[in-house]
Amino acid sequence: MHAPVLVLKDSLKRESGTKVHHANIQASKAVADIIRTTLGPRSMLKMLLDASGGIVVTNDGNSILRELDLAHPAAKSMIELSRTQDEEVGDGTTSVIVLAGEMLHVAEAFIEKNYHPTVICRAYNKALEDAIAVLDKIAMTIDVKDRSTMLGLVKSCIGTKFTSQFGDLIADLAIDATTIVGVDLGQGLREVDIKKYIKVEKVPGGQLEDSKVLKGVMFNKDVVAPGKMKRKIVNPRIILLDCPLEYKKGENQTNAELVREEDWEVLLKMEEEYIENLCMQILKFKPDLVITEKGLSDLACHYFSKAGVSAIRRLRKTDNNRIAKASGAVIVNRPDELQESDVGTGAGLFEVKKIGDEFFAFIVDCKDPKACTVLLRGASKDLLNEVERNLQDAMSVARNIIKNPKLVPGGGATELTVSATLKQKSSSVEGIEKWPYEAAAIAFEAIPRTLAQNCGVNVIRTMTALQGKHANGENAWTGIDGNTGVIADMKERKIWDAYNVKAQTFKTAIEAACMLLRIDDIVSGIKKKQAPGAGQAPKPKVETEADADGEQILPD
């Protein structure tokens, strides 16, 4: 008998075969169970302590999973799922995890029967194609201009969130904000850039009802000289700069030796004249408000206040871009290049208000703003953060619909329709793939089932009734009303989902499930080593003078 050969180091753990599959499936199910209760209108909130000791109270799948620190690699890849979903469509972060967890759960039975994972994956992919086809069939197109439809839609998407108790408020904010910043690309396409042009300002205090979408922008700055400059200007002419209005220092340090004392005065005078020139170039356009991203010297400030112009300095670049979009001004890099067309006249009102503890500058009542600020007020910081997350989701939903105005039924109806269709089709699938295909069909029922669980109704009875209704294909829009757990027609209850959110959810979930099923080997405990010869040797520690002080010269 030969002595056993050691291939892997002792420190490495290697698991392979079905053990890994089971471990991965267990891990993914654990992740899915964490956020299972946050699905649907009757959802629970999760409270998480993050690394810095702050608390996050939320039921947004992505936010929860982002804060979790997981050991298992498969669970980590589940978290990536909800992140993708969040970045891609902004909603459906919870369902994607629940669905993927369920897909893996039904695959477990097949792995025990020694099915090969690739067979299961093939069946899943086939199921995915058919599922998307079903979505296309039941989707209905809507008119983006029709406000009440949009409202119902966004409302049903955030109905699952904490803010649903404030009714239309968040939905209104989201729709207003996204319609303002929508840009027509032609051919009926609209592009909505939420990240760049919609700023959410959270100001603690007041009530949620005070939140509003400003037809313009606000930022956390005051005018430079509050006593002298006007704090309220109607129809201001706005000039935006991104250069400093102060004397230019040389790029590198220069020393000037002056022999005569008068030369020093000449030098100072030149500096003053330089700034005066700059200011005069700007003032000849008769602005009422000058905003710069960089510094503004006292002297320039003096010239401006003398001319009755308000000035704001050191503004964030992103804020400056928003002001430009809102007021129609052009950001100018050098004052001598100013033209009349660069002056923004689109704003109706500039004023500085004190909210709570801070001064905020508002540039509002713009004529045709392409950027806006959503002002959120609320009792506490945690509340505001949660509202902001919900608003993000709501705006994403509104954006998705503006981009692709197709709807599918919510309340688990879509999943049930897909499930019923796939069950019928499974009889025509040939060979061994038939069973995993059917299982995938059953897995889709996880969503309506979870909805029913969260309402606290009799799950089995409700599910059987729903399956019966869908099996004979009478009405694709029958689902669960998430508030009461009653079986209802989603069209009448106005419970809808955006088409591309659903499609993305299915795709992400199934593709992830396939990927996790294909893993058959986990090697852990790998030390981060460099290949011999490739890495440099660790640097010898060179003592610097600083170390010398710390060392005790006399031995203890």
Image: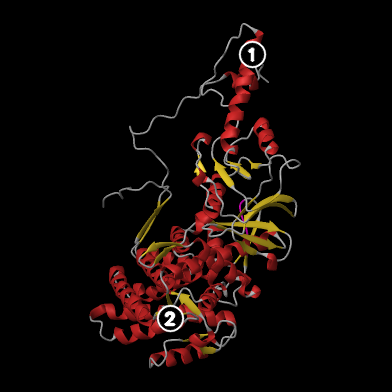
Seen at 45% across and 69% down, the residue is 402
Placement of 543 over or under 440, stated as above or below: above
Q: Secondary structure at mark 2?
A: helix
Pick whichever, 291 or 171, lies toward us: 291
* Crowd band around label 1 with a 10 angstrom C-alpha radius: few (<14), some (14–19), many (20+): some
Task: State the image coordinates of residue 121 (x, y, percent, origin top left).
Answer: 31, 70
2 vs 1, front mark: 1
Q: Which mark is residue 398?
A: none
Location of the C terminus by quadrant is top right
Q: Which mark is residue 264?
A: 1
- The boundaries of the magenta stretch are 47-51
Q: Can residue 307 be seen in this snapshot?
A: yes
Residue 420 is inside the magenta segment: no
| Residue neighbourhood size for the residue with mark 2, other residues' Cα within 10 Å, grouped as few (<14), some (14–19), many (≥20) | many
Looking at numbered disc 1 in the image, what kind of residue is underneath it?
Trp
Q: Amino acid at mark 2?
A: Thr
Evaluate if marks 2 and 1 touch, with contact meaning CB atoms under 8 Å apart. Answer: no
Query: What residue is rendered at 53% in x and 75% in y?
Result: 147
Q: Is residue 115 above or below residue 325?
A: below
Q: Residue 256 falls in which quadrant of the image? A: top right
Magenta span: helix, strand or loop, mainly? strand
Reading the image, the residue beneath label 2 is 414
The spot of residue 154 in percent (x, y) is: 53, 73
Q: What residue sits 47% from the left and 76% below the top?
A: 497
Percent x, y of residue 199 = 57, 56
Q: Nearer the viewer, residue 508 or 3?
A: 508
**Quadrant hosting residue 509:** bottom left
Q: Separation of disc 2 and disc 1 at Cα?
A: 80 Å
